[in-house]
């Protein structure tokens, strides 16, 4: 940390007390559920929303899949009746297609808020110039944002991004300024580069720098929030207007109860027993079954959540395996019934969960780094991710 950023960080000692305004939408507590592929579908969002308030964003969909009315994409943007406001995150590389998607969302009342993804670091996205690779092309970014904001009408448009491609190609300050100039309602920064992927430590000082660079719009911080007190520390240290929570809520929908308590000055924190966790796991799997309509597929999809829910609890390997390989709701319920339901919440569980680790390189289109100002849309930019 350099001396300037260190002093800036240490001068901020208290958390925000104001709701975040995302266009006409007031968000309190200032907490956003990050869109996560295969995770933040309607059943999971409902469980999180029941625990505490905030803004809950669906998993990323492609603009191409949306405008082509791809059936898979349409299924992914289903919202529960209780979800208000409704938030969609779009991935797109072609300004015209992004604009058409934004207009479609507005005219067909598909959502109340549009978020644009410029943070995804996975190779199938970045090698086409999308996600965290795109802000390097400043003029292309500006064209996309202009098309989205213009066509969204009264719907607020936000964007989520990373610091840049790597430490030699940082883009977040330029991207933040462009966003503010083009009428974006708020920006969120995952304080890692694409090369870091989910490894290392999030650079919270970058969030402070972004807030200083674009004071006219809300700045949300993302990265290494594993408990509610982390969120308070981030806001106090960086001066950001709110937080975006991703991997920290995997297997922990009740984190949103903790976050609401924390921002309201309430020291109470959720400490569910293993029995409480088992009930949440059953509800989650049942919700997936209602959403997907095919029980076996839903239960298979739930398997990835088992380890996250049970993290820190004393559960034997055989029972863990039984739960992680269940093929029906009845089979899952039978396994959950075998858990020691009185077992208390384990200490020291506010630790990283989900994928981690850095990448040796970021996959980019040929010549992508040659000119940061060109507006050329890579050929077949969305072909690998079309339809969701």
Image: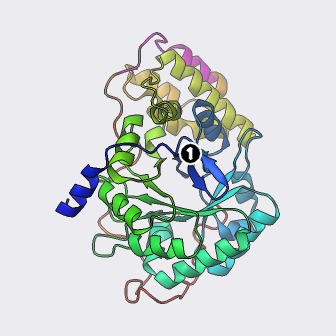
Percent x, y of residue 10: 25, 50
Residue 68: x percent and y percent?
75, 70
- Establish if 308 lies above or below 313: below
In the foreground, 372 or 158: 158
In the figure, is residue 298 to the left or right of 119? right
Q: How many marks?
A: 1
- Label 1, secondary structure: give it: loop
The residue furthest right is 108
Q: Residue at x 62, y 78 (%)?
A: 146
Image quadrant assignment for residue 295: top right
Direction top: furthest residue: 342
Q: Characterize the local packing of mark 1: few (<14), some (14-19) or many (20 or more) Cα atoms within 10 angstroms.
A: many
- Expressed as whole percent of the image width and height from the top left, the position of residue 201 reads 28, 52
Q: Quadrant of the N terminus?
A: bottom left
Q: Is residue 176 above or below residue 304?
A: below
> How far across and down, in percent of the image, does residue 249 sit?
48, 38
Residue 335 belongs to the span the image colors magenta: yes
Q: Is residue 262 above or below residue 128?
A: above
Magenta span includes 157: no
Residue occupied by mark 1: 39
- Residue 169 in the image: above or below residue 38: below
Residue 131 shown left or right of residue 386 in the figure: left
The answer, for residue 18, to whether it is visible in the render is: yes
The segment highlighted magenta reads 331-346
Q: Quadrant location of the C terminus?
A: bottom right
As rendered, which of 207 and 249 lies closer to the eye?
Answer: 207
């Amino acid at each position: 940390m350099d001396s300037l950023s260190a002093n800036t960080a240490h001068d901020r000692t208290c958390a925000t007390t104001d709701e975040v305004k995302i266009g006409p939408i007031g968000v309190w507590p200032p907490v956003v559920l990050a869109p996560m592929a295969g995770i933040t579908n309607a059943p999971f969002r409902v469980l999180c929303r029941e625990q505490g308030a905030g803004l809950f964003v669906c998993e990323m969909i492609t603009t191409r899949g949306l405008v082509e009315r791809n059936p898979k994409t349409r299924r992914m943007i289903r919202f529960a009746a209780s979800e208000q406001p409704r938030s969609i995150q779009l991935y797109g590389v072609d300004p015209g297609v992004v604009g058409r998607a934004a207009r479609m969302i507005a005219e067909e009342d598909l959502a109340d808020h549009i978020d644009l993804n410029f943070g995804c670091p996975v190779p199938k996205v970045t090698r086409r110039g999308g996600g965290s690779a795109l802000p390097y092309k400043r003029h292309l970014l500006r064209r996309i944002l202009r098309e989205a904001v213009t066509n969204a009408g009264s719907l607020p448009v936000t964007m989520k991004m990373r610091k840049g491609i790597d430490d030699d190609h940082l883009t977040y300050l330029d991207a933040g300024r462009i966003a503010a100039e083009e009428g974006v309602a708020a920006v969120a920064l995952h304080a890692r580069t694409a090369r870091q992927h989910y490894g290392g430590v999030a650079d919270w000082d970058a969030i402070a720098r972004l807030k200083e660079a674009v004071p006219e719009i809300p700045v949300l911080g993302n990265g290494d929030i594993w408990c509610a007190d982390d969120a308070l520390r981030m806001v106090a240290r960086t001066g950001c207007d709110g937080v975006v929570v991703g991997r920290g809520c995997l297997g922990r929908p009740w984190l949103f109860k903790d976050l609401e308590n924390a921002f309201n000055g309430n020291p109470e924190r959720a400490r569910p027993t293993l029995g409480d966790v088992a009930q949440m796991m059953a509800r989650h799997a049942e919700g997936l079954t209602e959403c997907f309509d095919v029980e076996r597929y839903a239960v298979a999809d739930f398997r990835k959540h088992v380890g996250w829910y049970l993290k820190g609890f004393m559960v034997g390997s055989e029972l863990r395996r039984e739960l992680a390989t269940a093929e029906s709701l009845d089979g899952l319920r039978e396994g959950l019934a075998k858990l020691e339901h009185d077992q208390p919440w384990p200490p020291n569980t506010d630790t990283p969960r989900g994928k981690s680790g850095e990448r040796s390189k970021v996959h980019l289109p040929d010549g992508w780094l040659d000119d940061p100002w060109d507006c050329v849309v890579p050929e077949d930019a969305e072909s690998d991710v079309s339809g969701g």
